Amino acid sequence: QVQLVESGGGLVQAGDSLRLSCAASGRTLSSLKMGWFRQAPGKEREFVAQISWTGDINYANSVKGRFTISRDNAKNTVYLQMNSLKPEDTAVYYCAAGSRPYSLQYGYWGQGTQVTVSS
């Protein structure tokens, strides 16, 4: 079992930055694919960014160049640095972890952290 706890959300103005953290327990993250997703009101959950156990990174086009995903295996934590925030980035952000080591499927989710960007 993997427990994920997100933090770092809040209310900011357009153009500001936030850093989200996802602290994991129950299993080391170094062998897991980790990702960030978000869900805006009235919309489906969408992919934001992911980082594999090899360090390969992918971003959604909507955040490319503004968001950076990283991991600190020593702290068993994954981060999402969000710069140049826009009102359309407003959503609940969820951290996800692979279902098992070296798996491409996500199997664990955090409870989410709210990010609100005012114009």
Image (cartoon, grey):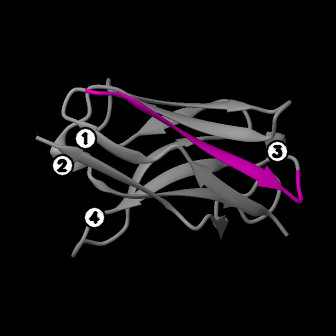
Q: Dots 1 and 2: beta carbons under 8 Å?
A: yes
Q: Dots 4 and 2: beta carbons under 8 Å?
A: yes
Secondary structure under badge 3? helix
User: Which of disc 2 and disc 4 is earlier in sequence?
Assistant: 4
Label 1 vs label 3: CA separation? 27 Å
The mark lying in front, picked from 1 and 4, is: 4
The crowd level at tag 1 (other Cα within 10 Å; few <14, some 14-19, many 20+) is: few
Q: Which residue is mark 4?
A: 40
What amino acid does circle 2 point to?
Glu
Query: Is the N terminus in the top left, top right, bottom left or bottom right quadrant?
Result: bottom right
Q: Which residue is mark 2?
A: 88
Give coordinates of residue 84: x percent, y percent.
Answer: 26, 26
Does residue 83 sit above or below 39 in this rendering? Answer: above
Relative to residue 3, is residue 39 drawn left or right? left
Q: Quadrant of residue 109?
A: bottom right
Does residue 41 sit above or below 118 in this rendering? Answer: below
Q: Which residues are magenta?
A: 16-27
Q: Dots 2 and 3: beta carbons under 8 Å?
A: no
Q: Residue at x 80, y 64 (%)?
A: 2
